[in-house]
Each structure stands twice: as C-alpha cells, then as structure tokens.
Image (cartoon, rainbow, N blue to C red):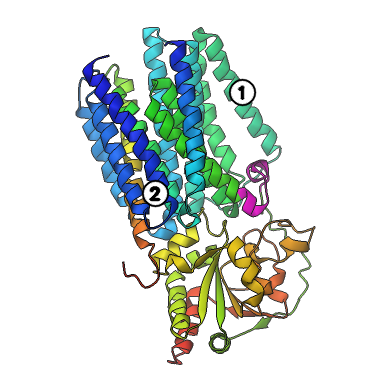
Amino acid sequence: MSLVEHLTQATYLAAAALFIFSLRWLSTPKTARQGVAAGVAGMTLAVIGTVLHPEIVSYKWILIALVVGTAIGVPLSWVPLTAVPQRTALSHAFGGLAAGLVGTAKYMLWLQDGELTEFRTFAIVVEVLLGYLTFTGSLMAAGKLQEVLPTRPITYKNQNVINLLLLAVAIASGLYIVARPETWQLFPVVVVLSLLFGVLLILPIGGADMPTVISLLNSYAGLSAVAMGFVLENKVLITAGALDGSSGFILSVIMCKAMNRSFTNVLFGAFGQVAQVQAAAEAKAVKSATPRDVADILENASSVVVIPGYGMAVAQAQHRVRELYDQLSKRGIDCRFAIHPVAGRMPGHMNVLLAEAEVPYTALSEMDDINPDMPQVDVAIVVGANDVVNPAARHDKTSPIFGMPIINADKAKTVIAIKRSMNPGFAGIENELYYGDNCLMAFGDAKAVLGDIVKALSGEGGIH
Amino acid sequence: MHTLDLWSMLFVFMLATFVGFQVIQNVSRLLHTPLMSLTNAISAIAIVGSIIIAGEEKTVLSTVLGAVAVAASMTNIVSGFLITDRMLKMFREKGKPR
C-alpha cells in the first residue's frame, strides 16, 4: 500500500468517526448544530482523501459535476419548510440514482476487463436494484407530495400480484447473471424492471402514508449506499450507508407503530383509496362557534393544548398559531403543543414548522407525554389534524384506524376544532370527536380563523 | 478480492448498523426531520466512489455515468447540510432570541 493510499484510508476512518459524532449530537437541540459541522468536516476530509487517488487521470468532469451539484443543491436548500417532505424525497431519489449509476458503470467496466467475480456481480445487482427502485420510487413520492401527481392511491386489478411478480423477475434475472456471467444481456432487464418497480410501488400509496414511505425510501437509499460500499470495497461507504439505513428503518418503525399498521399494510394496503365514507352520513348535529366565542373560552382557561396536523401546513397557519401562543402566554395561560408522530407528511414535520414560527421547542410535547394530562386540560384546539384525534381509534373495531394511538383531545374539558367544512379527512373517515358534547367547531380557513381569534384576544375586536 | 476482505466488510456493516441503531434511538423526536436530511447528506459519501469513476476516464460512458453520480451526490451533500443547519437554527428554548 502506498503512502497516498494510507492517507486516503486515514481520512475515511476519520470521516466515519465524525459521521457517528454528527448523529450523536442530534440527541438534543442544544448540540445539534455541532452535528452538522461534524458531518461537513467528515465529508470534506473524505473528498480530499479521494481526489488524491492515483487512478484519477483528469479532474475536468469531476469539477464540472461538483459545480452542477452545488448549483442545484444550494437553491434546493431554500425551499419553504412546508416543502421539506418533497425535498427529502427528491434527495432520496438522487442518492438512489448515484448508487444505480455507479453500479452500472462498474458492471460495464469489469465486464469489459473480465474482472467480474460472483461476489462483485452479486453486490452490483443488489446495488442497482435498490438504487434504481429508490430513484423512481422517490421521484413518485416527491411528485405526489408536490401534488404534480394525484395524491390519492392509484390502484388496478391484481396490483400486488403484478408488482411482486415484477420484482421476482428482476431478482431472478439478477441472480441468473451472477450464476451465468455470459448472460450479461440480462443486465439492462434488471435495470428497467427496478426502475419500473419503483414507480409501481408508490402508485397505490396515499398522502397520509407518506411519513412511513419516505422513511422506508430513506432506508433503501442507505442500503443502496452500503451495497455500493461492498462493490467498491469502501468501508466508509458501508458505515455511512448503514447509519442512513438504520435511521430510515427506525423512523419507519416509529411511523408504523404510530399508525398501528405493519410495513406490508402500508406498502400493499392502498389505505384511504376510495374514501370509505359511510354513504348515509347521518346528519348528526355539531355545535359551531365564532372566533369571538373561542376567544372568550380561551380567556377563561388556565391550560390550553394545541394539536396541529397537516392542515396547519396546508393553510400556512403556523405563524398565527405562534401569535395565539404569545397571547395566551402573556395572560399566564399554560399553552402547549401536542405532536402526533405521523402528523404532517414526514417524521418531525410539525416540530420544524412550529420552530420556524418561533415557538420554543420546550412547548412541544410528544403524544405519550401529553395524553395523561389531557383530562386536566381546559381547552384542546385542533388545527388541521383529523385522524390522529379520532376517538374511534380507541373503541370502534369497525373503524379503519382502530388501534392507532391517538392524542386524547376528546378528554379535554372543551375541544375546539378549526376546520374548513365537515368533509372527512384524508383517509376519508368520519371523526366522532366533532360530535362530542364538549366539542365546538370553528369553521373556516385555519389561518383566517386563528387570526380572528388572536385579534379578539388582543382586544382589537376587528372581526370581519 | 480476498475472502478476508469480504468478512471484514461484513463486520464493518454489522457494527455500523448496531452503532446506527443506538445513536438514532437517542435522537430527539423533535429533530426527526433534520435527522432525515442529515443522514441523507451523510450517505451522499457515495460521492467518493463516483469521483473515482468520473476521474479515471476509462470509457466515455463510465465517465458520463460517474459524473452524473458525482453531481447527484454533491446536490445531496450541499442541500442536505445547508437545510439541516437552516432548520436547526430555528429550534430555540423559551425566551432565547435566535
């Protein structure tokens, strides 16, 4: 081993350690930014270690590609925080694409030089399969989140059988190339089938399942990097990929548990496909309240819990929510936020939006921490959340969301639900919370309604 | 490749997965969105593999594929680290200005 190679390996070793520190520092918001610095340092070291590599004969294409990547990456980091789920899906797509392309390039180079071994071919097949399916799958997910593609699940007859058959053919072709290297013509078949499978995998998935699916694709992107590490015999790649893969896996498990569903159910269940609204939605009575009524109720409360959901992001109401928080805090009313793990379109989505609106993170509570306190809470305000506060999940065995852990909004003394209309939420399930004796509906756009409540509270009285 | 290399890679994979599980389980739930963008940037370390393929210029096609892979990884590195930092800056305690 030459001196340069030792140096390169040393930078990889340091990078791997820095990546582990980077994630460790995310354990609390206080040290989290150090984590980013460690990650950047590790990445820079590894890249420097790599460009020293003696096999590099020209830097032209590397430099051009680095410039192009920076030119795309910088604006991508400016997206509004409501669009972070799309950006994340897009970055999984780029990760998958890189793995797929490197696998393809390596296969062709080794095929040409007669350097393909069984192990190398096997690792490449895994890399290419995972890489390309993550690529198209994540593009589909990004499209659905950006709403350039229909967000409702798209289903067809025998969908699961067809999809699994397709995957089986892709895997079988891949294994055949491993066993019979002379059948290299099958390689493009593996590529095309992986790309196609990625699309088909995401077609039947609805918006409410996106947090799980994004986490799962995160895991696949990590695993494709691991496979690339095995192909290139590069241990820092294996390490970083394993960290990414396990992170995505843990997040998917958390998301699945928070919906009381299994991976298979999320991937093959086509949840919420045809809005299972009970056709005879009995005209049950709901009580409605004006923003002025709500303000009066809030003034007399001593503890308030706000439960945000994806609707808050859609209405861009997070800043109004912060104003409400300020008004309540000013009056000495205890105001907290109850965050359900699957609220929003990706893990942690609500926390980031509220942090952006300058709500201190100390006011954000997790579902399990706040539920025991709910019976003592005077007012629970539901802003754009629906299924995650539906009491049917606790007792109605016929409900599609039965068994899903929920925030017990109904246990609060008064519930105020801010909602556009009585239309059922994303999964198309009636919410019995709204028909409870303690529930008042404040109809309208979340941003406008909250704005009026804040105005009434601040005594301007300027209600339109 | 020596068989020993394969086994040492499997060891690295196994150990890194365990470390990953331990470390990620300790990540604050508040920070799950930044966690995802940070791990995403970190796994773009795939850039090191792509750089060599783009730089060794063995065939036209492999150079093109390598260069596209470098650009894709670089996009993830730049946007991933920048947006993670942008989000983390927003998390503040009560009463503390940014």
**Do pointers 1 and 2 mark residues of a single chain?**
yes
The answer to whether A349 is drawn above or below residue A106 in the figure is below
Instruction: Kindly report the distance in space between the C-alpha atoms of the residues bearing marks 1 and 2.
Output: 43 Å
Res. B74 in view: yes
Q: Which picture quadrant has residue A407? A: bottom right
Amino acid, disc 1: Val
Query: Chain under label 1?
Result: A
Instruction: Decide if residue A134 is in sight here.
Output: no
Q: Position of residue A6 (x, y in %)?
A: 27, 21
Between circles 1 and 2, the one closer to the viewer is 2
Q: Residues within 10 Å of mark 2 (few under 14, many from 20)?
A: many
Above or below, B51 relative to A244 = above
- Please say whether residue A257 is one of the residues in the magenta stretch: yes
**Of the residues shown, which amino acid type is indicated by label 2?**
Trp
The picture places residue A247, in percent across and down from the top left corner, at: 49, 42
User: Residue B8 lies in what quarter of the image?
Assistant: top left
Mark 1 highlights which residue?
A169
- Which quarter of the picture shows residue A70? top left
User: Relative to residue A36, is residue A8 depicted above or below?
Assistant: above
Q: Mark 2 belongs to which subunit? A: A
Residue position for label 2: A25
Judged by its main secondary structure, the magenta piece is: helix
Q: Earlier in the sequence, mark 1 or mark 2?
A: 2
Look at the numbered disc 2 and give the secondary structure of its residue. Answer: helix
Please provide the residue range marked out in magenta.
A256-270
